Amino acid sequence: MNTGNLIEYLDWLFAHFDAAFARAKAQVCVTLGGARIDCRTSIGSYAETLRIALADGGAPIRADCRILVACADTLGLPGLPAWDEPFFLERAVEAALSATRYRLHHMAENGFWQFYDRETGRGLQLQRTARDLPPWDGGSPLRNFLHWHMRGASRALVHAGSLGIGGRGVLLSGPGGSGKSGTVLAGILHGLETVGDDYVLVDVAQATLARPLFRTLKTDPAGYARLQLQHWPAVRPGLNWQGKHQFTLGDIGAAPQTAGLVIDAICLPRVGTDRTTRFDPVSPKQAFLAIAPSGVSQIPGDRDVSFGVCAALARRLPAYQMTLGPDPGEIAQAMTGFIEDLRP
């Protein structure tokens, strides 16, 4: 396979899809962002990953998406494709497919492929072995498929956390170490709502609405100690590939994710040195630069759509630098008052 024969190859590959999908024994069905996702797999451990990580709720309002996760040379599927160019250049492949029905992602180091047919809503994740997965997959499985299936002129996956009260709230964005995940966790542990800590589905068509995709949460060892998560037996002491503890909302006794949050502002957390948390206005440019690059760089294909949604967020919503105090309870209290003050 190469950039010159991608369409021919993908047409041939998806000719195998329906029969292989029917043969896969494990099934996980969820409703995400109004879309019904039907995932089949021959890898039992992957089905469990999906059941743990994916949010589920609400009545479907869009056409179904069918995703098959399988190892190569199983279920009647072909072996892994051989890329017959010196290098796999992701942006060149994206450009070659941009005007077509297909999307594709590849990690050459572990023989991992994802293929998606936009016209039929079918996705195929083909991997060398059950263990050959990207390191981030356990926290946000099927992320690329969700992006390709749900993206539209006004909606996209956004790399941000969220907190809210009574169906209204804020997005939180920042680089690693900024305190974003710790702020989300502090809020959840003190009764605030969330639609996610890492990736959320955002629609800017009318009111800015964020919906949940994943139930997973993460925190570094310092946050684990500060939030006293050792008192929750389901939060395991082992660390993931980022050196963080990974767990779910249910593991810390939190209420189920709300179906959606109307977003009233963007907050950019950073670790401070004062005893109390404060909020200072920042420019739309600062908000855009905080919220756009990480998500756009991490999710392949249709990056222009992601940039457009992030730009709309930055133009539409007020943004604030959130300088964090040291106490999680005080941070949650400050966030509660901030969200309540935003209400129209």
Image: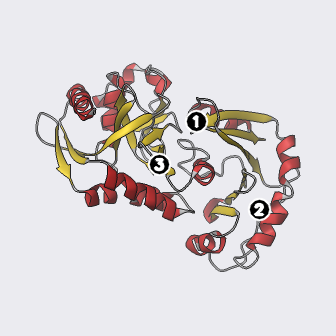
> Tag 2: Cα neighbours inside 10 Å, few (<14), some, or many (≥20)?
some
Residue 283: give its label: none
Task: Please determine whether, in this image, residue 1 is positioned above or below residue 135.
Answer: below
| Residue 295 percent across, percent down from the top left | 45, 55
Q: Which of pointers 3 and 1 lies earlier in the amino acid sequence?
A: 1
Secondary structure at numbered mark 2 = loop
Please tell me in which quadrant of the rendered image residue 223 appears.
top left
Few, some or many C-alpha atoms within 10 Å of disc 3 (few <14, some 14-19, many ≥20)?
few
Q: Amino acid at mark 1?
A: Leu
Kindly indicate the quadrant of the structure image that contains residue 278: top left
Q: Is residue 189 visible?
A: yes
Q: Earlier in the sequence, mark 2 or mark 1?
A: 1
Classify mark 3: helix, strand or loop.
loop
Q: Estimate the spatial distance between the alpha carbons at disc 2 and disc 3, rounded to whole Å.
A: 40 Å
Q: CA distance from mark 3 to mark 1?
A: 24 Å
Instruction: Give how far apart the Cα atoms at labels 2 and 1 are.
Output: 27 Å
Tell how many labels: 3
Identify the amino acid type marked 2.
Leu
Protein image colouring: secondary structure
- Residue type at mark 3 is Ala
Asked if the residue at tag 1 contacts the one at tag 2, i.e. Cβ–Cβ closer than 8 Å, the answer is no
Q: Is residue 215 above or below residue 286?
A: above
For the residue pair 155 and 55, the one nearer the viewer reads as 155
Q: Is residue 188 left or right of residue 148?
A: left
The 10 Å Cα crowd at callout 1, few under 14, some 14 to 19, many 20 or more, is many
What residue is disc 1 on? 54
Q: Would residue 285 be found to the left or right of residue 235 on screen? A: left
For image coordinates 78% across by 65% down, the residue present is 10
In the image, taking residue 324 as reference, residue 110 lies left or right, namely right
- Residue linked to disc 3: 205
Q: Which residue is mark 2?
A: 80
